[in-house]
Image (spheres, helix red, strand yellow):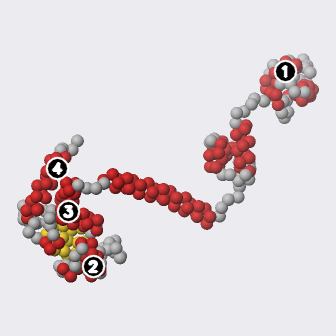
Amino acid sequence: MTSPTGKYADFEGLREQAIALRREGLSLRQIRDRLHIDNNDILNRLVKGEPPPEWTKRPNAKDDLRAKARELRLQGMTYDQIQVELGCSKSSISLWVRDLPKPEPRYTAAEQRALMDAGLARVRAAHEESRQEAKRAAQEAIGRLSDRDLFIAGVTLYWAEGAKDKAYRRCEALQFINSDPNVITLYLRWLELLGVTRDRMHFRVSIHETADVDEAERFWAALADVDAGTFKKATLKRHNPRTTRKNTGETYRGCLIIHVTRSADLYRRMEGAWYGIVLGAGPAA
């Protein structure tokens, strides 16, 4: 086993003994002690190629995960799906299953697009339902308006959208223009609260020259519950060919202008009430 020229001169003979002991199930420490080998490099070379006995292997916490990942990969799962299933990193999954064949796609490109579109549709539907529910809750929270509520709402609406008296242009009269039917409906209800009858209201449509003026007048007349024949001549807006209009189509009906005759006192009342609202609200924090 040894010779004067070196402790491990009979390396092959020593290797045969080490392999035999390894196959009997001895650990490296046991082989080292049995053969009196104090050089770890020599010891490893003596048993090179011989697997260690099972009882000497340390248990690996990831062995079960690795086995499960390989099983799922063979079932055709993607890295993302395996990650969701096992909760481990994609880098670990890649190391564990990279020798396995890549699974065939479960869906064609057209099917994948259809699934994505369906998923997006569900998400958008959920978002839309959430939006509508928020609106419904807010609407129900308002309830029935008192006359005071309606008066304050009308004053605020007029100050935002109505014509106002200026030092350089005296105009103490109620004149309102808007394209939103709901806004017009609220404004008309406010005028009724103020005691303004329809015979004191002059109506006129302001609309692009390319639109259907007659149809627009019929629409607004029905909304205001008046005869379209009483409308003043429509104000036509010239079309600029260099611009692209988006307010087109069947739902475009221009704007309705409502002028109230003999309304100077009402205008002053409205303006005074507006500043009362501002003072009543107090300064912004």
Residue that numbered label 1 is attached to: 30
Could you tell which of marks 1 and 4 lies nearer the N-terminus? Answer: 1
Between 242 and 126, the residue placed more toward the observer is: 126
Q: Residue at x 27, y 75 (%)?
A: 222
Q: CA distance from mark 1 to mark 4?
A: 94 Å
Looking at the rendered image, the disc whose residue lies closer to the viewer, 3 or 4, is: 3
Say which amino acid is labelled 1: Gln
Q: CA distance from mark 2 to mark 1?
A: 105 Å
Q: Residue at x 78, y 30 (%)?
A: 57
Position of residue 176 measured from the top left corner of the image (x, y, whole percent): 18, 67
Q: CA distance from mark 2 to mark 3?
A: 22 Å
Q: Tell me the number on the disc at residue 192.
A: none
State if disc 4 and disc 1 touch (CB < 8 Å). Answer: no
Q: CA distance from mark 1 to mark 3?
A: 101 Å
Kindly state the secondary structure of the residue where label 4 is placed: helix
Q: Residues within 10 Å of mark 2 (few under 14, many from 20)?
A: some
On the image, which quarter does residue 213 sit in?
Answer: bottom left
Between 42 and 214, the residue placed more toward the observer is: 214
Looking at the rendered image, the disc whose residue lies closer to the viewer, 1 or 4, is: 4
Q: Is residue 128 left or right of residue 71?
A: left
Between 44 and 219, the residue placed more toward the observer is: 219
Could you tell which of marks 4 and 2 lies nearer the N-terminus? Answer: 2
Residue that numbered label 4 is attached to: 278
Residue that numbered label 3 is attached to: 190
Q: CA distance from mark 3 to mark 4?
A: 19 Å
Could you tell which of marks 1 and 3 lies nearer the N-terminus? Answer: 1
Position of residue 263 measured from the top left corner of the image (x, y, whole percent): 10, 66
Q: Say if 284 sits above or below 52 in the image.
A: below
Kindly state the secondary structure of the residue where label 2 is placed: helix
Between 55 and 226, the residue placed more toward the observer is: 226
Q: Residues within 10 Å of mark 1 (few under 14, many from 20)?
A: few
Residue that numbered label 2 is attached to: 218
